Structure formats: structure tokens, C-alpha cells
Image: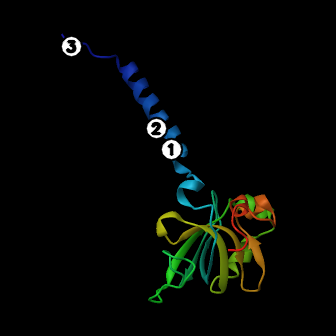
């Protein structure tokens, strides 16, 4: 004879499993810097600022540039324009550096230069540190706030001759 579990036990077990799954979602939602970006290098991407997303957990912005995702030190050989996606720190951290949303939004459609750690895998993305906006003002949007004007730790072991 087959014995069935009481409805209360089944219901409680189902609620426990559902709660555990819902609580685990935030753990997987955030990413590790070292998995997405190469913190040992910097790239400089110059192009037209096309979009700004000023929201948590990070600010994001797009720059249309002819720089090649495979080798961001040179323009794409075919002259192709690529949409680069950059990630900054959280809104509150960016604001603590003195950078305001208007600093970026007012530069949409204008030429900017972004200093960033490149994305891994030859993707057109980066972890932005600073943005030089069209009026030659540089705003801090990322990790530079942690190290000030000096080199970030990833720069310390680079040969200053090269």
C-alpha cells in the first residue's frame, strides 16, 4: 500500500524550495570584474557618445567608434563603426567623484574619449574609468576614484619605457 505525504508537508517543502531559489537569484545577478574585464590593461576609445543609462547597479553608456574590438589600439581595417558598451561604477559612487548625469547626457552626439579596462574575448565593451567629454573636461565614472590620480595597481608592474 502506497502512503502519501500530508498536504501540509508537501506545501511547506514547496515553499522552502521556492524561497531558496528566489534568495539565490541575487547571488548570480552580480558579476565579477575579473571574469568580464582585463584589469591589467587600459584602452582609449574615441568616438561619439550615443546613449547614457544612469541607474543602479552601474551606469552604462555607448560610444560609436571605428576602433577595432579585436585590437582596440587601431581603427577597424574596413572602417566599420562599432558600438562600444561601457560600464561605470554605481550612481552613488560616481556622484561622489563630482561627476553628474548632465556631464554625460550633455555630451550625447559629441566626441568623447573613454579610458577603460577592455572586455575579455574581443568584445566591444569595457569597464570605464574616465570619460574626456567634448569640452576637454575629464569626468571619473569608475575605478579611478579608488586610486586617485596615481596609477592603478594594474599599471604598477608595467615597464614605463613601453
Residue 70 locus on image (x, y percent): 48, 74
Real-space Cα separation, disc 1 to disc 2, in angstroms: 7 Å
- Of residues 25 and 75, the one nearer the viewer is 75
Q: Name the residue under label 2.
A: 21
How far apart marks 1 and 3 lie (CA) works out to 37 Å
Which residue in the structure is indicated by mark 1? 25
Task: Find out whether the residues at labels 1 and 2 contact each other: C-beta distance under 8 Å.
Answer: yes
Q: Is residue 143 left or right of residue 80?
A: right
The C terminus lies in quadrant: bottom right
Residue 88 found in image quarter:
bottom right
> Residue at the location (57% across, 61% down)?
37
- What label does residue 2 carry, if any? 3
Of labels 1 and 3, the one closer to you:
1
Asked whether the residues under the numbered discs 2 and 3 touch, taking CB atoms below 8 Å apart as contact, a structural biologist would say no
* Crowd class of label 1 (few under 14; some 14 to 19; many from 20; radius 10 Å): few
First-in-chain label (1 vs 3): 3
Q: Residues within 10 Å of mark 2 (few under 14, many from 20)?
A: few
Quadrant for residue 149, please give it. Answer: bottom right
**Mark 2 to mark 3 CA distance (whole Å):** 30 Å
Amino acid at each position: 500500500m502506497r502512503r502519501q505525504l500530508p498536504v501540509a508537508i508537501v506545501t511547506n517543502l514547496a515553499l522552502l524550495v521556492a524561497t531558496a531559489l528566489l534568495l539565490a537569484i541575487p547571488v548570480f545577478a552580480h558579476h565579477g570584474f575579473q571574469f568580464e574585464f582585463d584589469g591589467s590593461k587600459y584602452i582609449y576609445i574615441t568616438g561619439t557618445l550615443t546613449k547614457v543609462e544612469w541607474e543602479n547597479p552601474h551606469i552604462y553608456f555607448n560610444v560609436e567608434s571605428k576602433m577595432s574590438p579585436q585590437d582596440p589600439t587601431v581603427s577597424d581595417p574596413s572602417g566599420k563603426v562599432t558600438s562600444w558598451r561601457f560600464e561605470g561604477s554605481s550612481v552613488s559612487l560616481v556622484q561622489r567623484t563630482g561627476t553628474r548625469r548632465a556631464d554625460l547626457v550633455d555630451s550625447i552626439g559629441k566626441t568623447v574619449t573613454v579610458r577603460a579596462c577592455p572586455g575579455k574575448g574581443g568584445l566591444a565593451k569595457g569597464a570605464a574609468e574616465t570619460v574626456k567629454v567634448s569640452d576637454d573636461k575629464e569626468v571619473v565614472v569608475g575605478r579611478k576614484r579608488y586610486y586617485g590620480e596615481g596609477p592603478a595597481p594594474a599599471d604598477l608592474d608595467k615597464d614605463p619605457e613601453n
